[in-house]
Image (cartoon, rainbow, N blue to C red):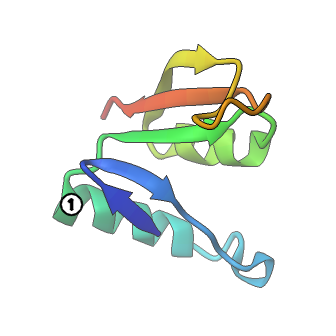
């Protein structure tokens, strides 16, 4: 997991470790120790969108391209609770 200025920039887990609570633990640590409030999610990754939704993030903006101008729609999400 990489965090900068209150935003999760990346979070990767090997598929063998999906659904074992590790992602939740990392996000909770980011909330409690680093005051994380934002994350950007590729809209074409519905599992990630659902995961961050369960963690309390909600979409506040949708961009049709990523930050490099590639045609990957990005959901800008903010922590609500």
Indicate the position of residue 54 as horizontal and vertical percent values: 54, 42
As drawn, 66 above or below 60? below
Residue at horizontal 68 percent and vertical 29 percent from the top: 69
Q: Mark 1 — residue? A: 34
All told, the count of numbered labels is 1
Residue at horizontal 20 percent and vertical 52 percent from the top: 35
As drawn, 33 above or below 57? below
Residue 45: image quadrant is top right
Indicate the position of residue 63 as horizontal and vertical percent values: 62, 19
Q: Is residue 62 left or right of residue 16?
A: left
As drawn, 20 above or below 50? below
Residue at horizontal 69 percent and vertical 25 percent from the top: 65
Q: Is residue 34 left or right of residue 13?
A: left
Indicate the position of residue 57 as horizontal and vertical percent values: 45, 35
Q: Nearer the viewer, residue 6 or 71?
A: 71
Residue 70: image quadrant is top right
Q: Nearer the viewer, residue 32 or 34?
A: 34
As drawn, which residue projects farthest toward the front?
68
Residue at horizontal 47 percent and vertical 30 percent from the top: 77
Q: Quarter of the image containing the C terminus?
A: top left
Q: Secondary structure at mark 1?
A: helix
Disc 1 residue crowd, few under 14, some 14–19, many 20+, Cα 10 Å: some
């Amino acid at each position: 997991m990489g965090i900068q200025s209150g935003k999760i920039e990346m979070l990767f887990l090997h598929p063998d470790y999906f659904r074992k609570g590790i992602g939740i633990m990392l996000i909770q640590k980011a909330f409690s120790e680093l005051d994380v409030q934002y994350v950007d999610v590729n809209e074409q990754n519905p599992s990630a969108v659902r995961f961050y939704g369960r963690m309390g993030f909600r979409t506040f903006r949708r961009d049709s391209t990523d930050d490099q101008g590639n045609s990957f729609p990005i959901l800008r999400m903010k922590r609500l609770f």
